[in-house]
Image (tube, rainbow, N blue to C red):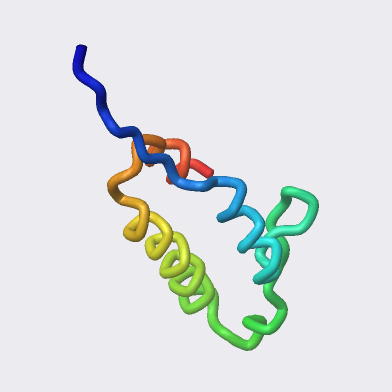
Amino acid sequence: MKKFLRIEAPIRLIKARKVKAGFLKNNKTKPRFIWLHLSKDQIIHRYNAIYRGYLNYYYFVSNYGKLSSY
């Protein structure tokens, strides 16, 4: 019987980092008022950069679909 190594992204740790950074509060997204002076496109670009950063860092994990939908 073959044994495989299964690596998963630490969803709880990522969630805790988002709470600490001020992106989440009570499991809901929290507005970043410090970005209020930016245009809509710049705000979307910054959020997407953070999102893509997590996905690129954990590209090899077996729960990638769950991570990307979170």
Nearer to me, 30 or 21? 21
Residue 38 is situated, as x and y percent measured from the top left of the image, at: 57, 85
Residue 51 is situated, as x and y percent measured from the top left of the image, at: 45, 60
* Quadrant placement of the N terminus: top left
Q: Is residue 8 left or right of residue 29?
A: left
Nearer to me, 70 or 43? 70
Residue 53 image-quadrant placement: bottom left
Residue at the extreme left of the image, as rendered: 2
> Image height check: is 38 above or below 8?
below
Nearer to me, 6 or 63? 6
The number of numbered discs placed on residues in the rendered structure image is: 0
Residue 35 image-quadrant placement: bottom right
> Image height check: is 5 above or below 56?
above
Q: Is residue 45 left or right of residue 21?
A: left
Nearer to me, 43 or 50? 50
Residue at left offset 65%, top offset 71%: 21
Residue 69 is situated, as x and y percent measured from the top left of the image, at: 48, 41
